[in-house]
């Protein structure tokens, strides 16, 4: 019997993971610059964490979660997103009592049993960040600026759409006005939108159904119903973005259907993704900590799918750093091959990516392999080199060659700036 990966999942082979590692490195670099700390939570949680933290009326909770019962009878769910687990951890570990502002980020796999399509898998990967503890519009702008900076460094062109979804004070008035509008066109709406007219009317504005969008083109917009506080928060957030030089489009149709979402909502979209154009999004969720059993705590966050980002980067011809050895050591006989093995270990300990031949192939075959792997330098050692304790070092780019003493090889390559940036000890 031949086994294959489960539908909606895939293997990431070494040729793939080098690109992933590069993306993750850029994310971690930006997070360090903004002083966000990484948080890692279990890949499964009590089902109630997501039912309460995402909303029981959502498609994620109703249709897409991988939920199972363990041997103790507890209902557990593979995480379909990370904000709810982060907030659960924030509450459990009393993080709000330790500092007034917790700035956290994550990178990891998520799980949703949805129909696989371009950029969407049943096991997929997201990165995101959460700023928990302050309601300052500067926090909203910082979250948006971090996402924009990551996209910029990865060569991803985007459009930022932004809106305000108000708060529990102004939203009931808007909900009532929107429902009154939707009831007039109820019979022409799609079945999902007909149902949402009564249960979650703001979600109707988010419908991808063409007819729904035509029917709601003149629907009331929430910006006209904002309280003075919500309006000021929105205007100050936009002012920060203006000062930062981050372009945006105010999109009245950009909504969030759950009550714990407040004020700022935003999405980054890319035309390189076709109809499924969302790169990632986020917003303020000042009611979620309390929803999950904690004290009322303001918070704002963002999340994006790494698979979808890679699709855009590849379409744009992004030049991913190659995963290749800096040095390839060619041994010409048994003695020099033994030396090559030991010297390779020395160079690796000095942070110099090094490869050798393990198949006792000819010099010609080893040179072909070095060229195939993209090695920058080839170190050649045979009988005469062993006697002189000096190897021939060939620069594969320049075509030049020089003799370097065995005990100087590590310092020679380090002096040329050849080293692994992740190696702490040189």
Image (cartoon, helix red, strand yellow):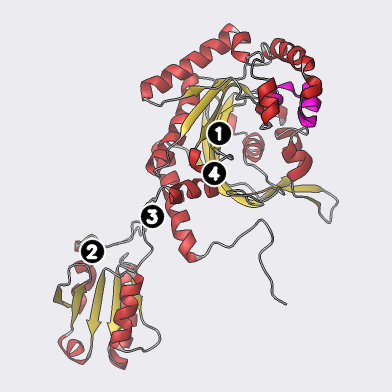
Label 4, secondary structure: give it: strand
Residue beneath disc 2: 414
Dot 4 crowding, Cα within 10 Å, few <14, some 14–19, many 20+: many
Q: Hey, which residue is sitting farthest top in the picture?
A: 228
Between 69 and 245, the one lying in front of the other is: 245
Residue sitting at x 32%, y 64%: 351
Asked if the stretch drawn in magenta spans residue 196, the answer is yes
Residue beneath disc 4: 106
The tag earlier along the polypeptide, 1 or 4, is 4
Separation of marks 3 and 4 at Cα, in angstroms: 22 Å
Report the disc number at residue 199.
Answer: none
Left or right? Give the position of 71 relative to 403.
Answer: right
Label 3, secondary structure: give it: loop
User: Which is more foreground, mark 2 or mark 3?
Assistant: 3
Separation of marks 3 and 1 at Cα, in angstroms: 25 Å
The tag earlier along the polypeptide, 1 or 2, is 1
Separation of marks 1 and 2 at Cα, in angstroms: 42 Å
Name above or below for residue 392 compared with residue 181: below
The tag earlier along the polypeptide, 3 or 4, is 4
Label 2, secondary structure: give it: helix
Residue beneath disc 1: 281
The tag earlier along the polypeptide, 3 or 1, is 1
User: Which is more foreground, mark 1 or mark 4?
Assistant: 1
Dot 3 crowding, Cα within 10 Å, few <14, some 14–19, many 20+: some
Q: Quadrant of the N terminus?
A: bottom right
Which contiguous range is marked in magenta? Answer: 190-204
Q: Quadrant of the C terminus?
A: bottom left
Residue beneath disc 3: 320
User: Which is more foreground, mark 3 or mark 4?
Assistant: 3
Residue 43, image x, y percentages: 66, 50
């Amino acid at each position: 019997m031949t086994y294959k990966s489960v539908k909606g999942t895939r293997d990431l082979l070494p040729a793939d993971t080098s690109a992933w590692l590069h993306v993750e490195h850029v994310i971690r670099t930006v997070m360090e610059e903004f002083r966000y700390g990484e948080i890692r939570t279990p890949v499964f949680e009590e089902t109630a964490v997501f039912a309460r933290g995402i909303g029981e009326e959502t498609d994620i909770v109703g249709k897409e979660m991988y939920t199972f019962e363990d041997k103790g009878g507890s209902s557990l769910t593979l995480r379909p997103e990370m904000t709810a687990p982060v907030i659960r951890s924030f509450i459990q570990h009393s993080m709000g009592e330790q500092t007034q502002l917790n700035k956290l980020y994550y990178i990891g796999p998520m799980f949703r049993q949805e129909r696989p399509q371009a950029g969407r898998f049943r096991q997929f990967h997201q990165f995101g960040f959460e700023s928990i503890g302050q309601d300052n519009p500067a926090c909203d702008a910082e979250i948006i600026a971090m996402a924009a900076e990551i996209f910029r460094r990865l060569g991803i062109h985007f459009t930022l759409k932004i809106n305000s979804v108000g708060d529990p004070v102004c939203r009931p008035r808007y909900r009532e006005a929107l429902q009154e509008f939707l009831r007039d066109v109820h019979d022409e709406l799609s079945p999902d939108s007909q149902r949402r007219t009564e249960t979650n009317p703001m979600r109707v504005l988010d419908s991808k159904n063409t007819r729904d969008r035509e029917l709601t083109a003149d629907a009331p917009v929430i910006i006209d119903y904002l309280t003075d506080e919500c309006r000021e928060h929105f205007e100050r957030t936009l002012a920060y973005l203006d000062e930062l030089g981050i372009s945006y489009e105010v999109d009245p149709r950009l909504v969030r259907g759950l009550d714990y979402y407040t004020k700022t909502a935003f999405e980054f979209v890319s035309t390189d993704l076709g109809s499924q154009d969302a790169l990632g999004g986020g917003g303020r969720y000042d009611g979620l900590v309390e929803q999950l059993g904690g004290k009322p705590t303001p918070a704002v966050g963002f999340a994006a799918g790494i698979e979808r980002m890679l699709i855009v980067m590849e379409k744009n011809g992004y030049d991913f750093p190659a995963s290749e050895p800096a040095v390839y050591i060619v041994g010409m006989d048994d003695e020099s091959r033994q030396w090559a093995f030991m010297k390779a270990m020395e160079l690796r300990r000095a942070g110099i990516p090094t490869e050798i031949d393990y198949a006792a192939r000819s010099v010609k075959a080893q040179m072909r392999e070095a060229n195939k792997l993209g090695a920058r330098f080839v170190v050649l050692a045979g009988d005469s080199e062993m006697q002189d304790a000096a190897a021939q070092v060939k620069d594969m780019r320049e075509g030049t060659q020089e003799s370097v003493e065995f005990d100087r090889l590590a310092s020679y390559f380090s002096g040329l700036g050849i080293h692994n940036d992740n190696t702490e000890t040189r």
